[in-house]
Image (tube, helix red, strand yellow):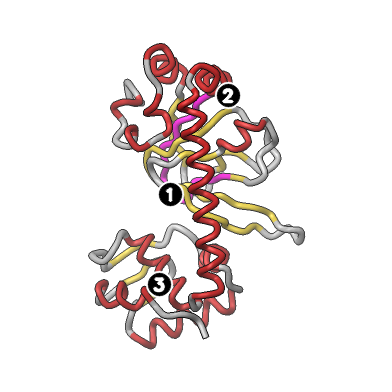
Amino acid sequence: MLDSCENCAHFEDSEWSVLGGCNAKGLDCARRSRHFLPGEPVYHEGDEPSGIYCVSSGLIGIRKVDAEGDSMLLRLVRPGQTFGYRSALTGAPHGVSAEALKDARVCHIPAATVRKALAEEPGLLMAFFRHLADDMAAAEVKVMETVSASCRVRFLRLLMALGGGEDAGLLELPVSRQDIASLIGVRSETMSRVIRGIEDEGLAHFSGRRVEIPDPHRLAEESVGALAA
């Protein structure tokens, strides 16, 4: 466990960086860090909120169960990002679940600590408003991509994001193909066709969750794409 939140590599980019004095010390005293194994839940849909979570390392997936009982992966939470804050701020039960997709270290800030800091430091509330606005903007971009970019381009962009950029020639997918289909908004059978097409083009080779990218720069160029027909 880190001695202080200020020692975290992601602290300066987090909402908590606006805290000072007693509230910063209170955050350090109340915060609890926990290691999650792949597939282990952080919380379930319908659980009462107990606080706010920050990802120190690893990868967290946010899921939603649809009317048919199928689990859909909605988005990924990366190191330095906060999640669970909407339920913590409103007091409503979690409308989604969160689980570790890779070995993850997650810090939990109890609800009482959050409420005290919000009451005493308006800057923290504004920081979460900005986070909410960013999340809404990202959701709008995702909707626009669904109608303006082909399935192939959306998948290539996801590979770029998961692989860490243009220099990553080998990666291990942290999620199943069904989850990838959920992330880019296609059916599983469509996902299979897209993967076959990308392999035929020589852009990537798939073996289970292992992906070999012969020319990452070419894949990056192809991920720019064009408007869907």
Q: Residue at x 29, y 66 (%)?
A: 170
**74 displayed left or right of 159:** right
Q: Amino acid at mark 1?
A: Lys
Q: Secondary structure at mark 1?
A: loop
Numbered disc total: 3
Q: Nearer the viewer, residue 196 or 157?
A: 157
Q: Is residue 214 visible?
A: yes
* Amino acid at the residue labelled 3: Leu
Between 168 and 18, which is closer to the camera in this rendering?
A: 18
Give how far across and how far down residue 117 sits, in percent.
50, 20
Dot 3: what SS? helix
Looking at the image, tell me whether mark 3 or mark 2 is earlier in sequence order.
2
Residue occupying image coordinates x 47% and y 28%: 124
For label 3, the residue is 156
Residue 41 belongs to the span the image colors magenta: no
Which residue is disc 2 drawn over? Answer: 111
Query: How crowded is the residue under tag 3: few (<14 C-alpha within 10 Å), some, or many (20+)?
Result: many
- Judge whether residue 178 can be spotted in this image: no
Which stretch appears magenta?
98-110
